[in-house]
Image: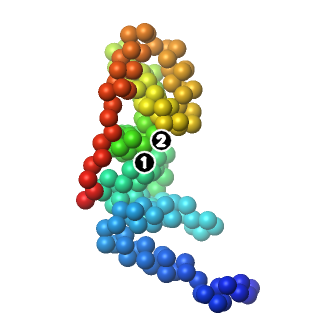
Amino acid sequence: MERPWYQKLFGSTAAVVQETAESKAAGGDADAQFSLGFRCANRGGSALDYSQAAAWYLKAANQNHVLAQFNLGIMHSSGQGMPKDDSLAGEWFRKAAAQGDSGAQHYLGVQQQRASFTGQPAAMTEARIEAYKWFQLAAASGYKGSAAAHELLTQKMSHADVVDGIRRAEAFTTVHPSTS
């Protein structure tokens, strides 16, 4: 198949862009590392490489790249390119949520809500209060589904627990760690 005229005239820049991103990523650029991870996990028509995506995300996440932290949480939660591990997923979600990522806050709410279904009554109550906090924070940022989850959860809580959840959400402050 013949190449389009503009590629004949200007050539393909995809290889140059890829080479530049790889060079920057190898030099420790967290945005470039995230970008390469994203490309590995979302190749249009090409073979996906989740383990390579996770490796790039990990490098960026260790430099406090919030989207890389969130994506690692998703990958650990679903077992993409690695064994499913809700504990590690929660750790990455907490790091991203602490930086104000509403997606991570929502997923922490989901994890805490699931934890509220089993265990000792005191632990179940604590999990509901934490889920309330995270859903409220995510809903305040407009994250889809958080407001509805927040409302459903509220129906299963005592007034005192709701007040505690509100207090925790109001006390939450985002952190902005320095990058390495």
What residue is pinned by disc 1?
70
Residue 119, given in percent of the width and then of the height, sits at 38, 20
Residue 141, given in percent of the width and then of the height, sits at 48, 36
Is label 1 in a helix, a strand or a loop? Answer: helix
Q: Residue furthest right?
A: 1
User: Which residue does the image show at 50% across and 31% down from the upper left?
Assistant: 139
Q: Residue furthest top?
A: 159
Residue 117, given in percent of the width and then of the height, sits at 46, 21
Q: Amino acid at mark 1?
A: Phe
Q: Closest to the observer: 53 or 173?
A: 173
Tally of numbered tags: 2
Residue 40, given in percent of the width and then of the height, sits at 50, 64
Q: Residues within 10 Å of mark 1 (few under 14, many from 20)?
A: many
- Can residue 107 be seen? no
Label whose residue precedes the other's in the sequence (2 or 1): 1
Is label 2 in a helix, a strand or a loop? Answer: helix
Q: CA distance from mark 2 to mark 1?
A: 7 Å
Quadrant where the C terminus lies?
bottom left
User: Which residue does the image show at 74% across and 85% down from the upper left?
Assistant: 1
Q: Report whether 94 appears left or right of 84.
A: left
Q: Closest to the observer: 57 or 120?
A: 57
Q: Is residue 146 above or below residue 6?
A: above
* The quadrant where residue 115 appears: top left
User: Which residue does the image show at 41% across and 74% down from the upper left?
Assistant: 22
- Can residue 79 be seen? yes
Q: Amino acid at mark 2?
A: Gly
What residue is pinned by disc 2?
103
**Pointers 2 and 1 in contact (C-beta within 8 Å):** yes
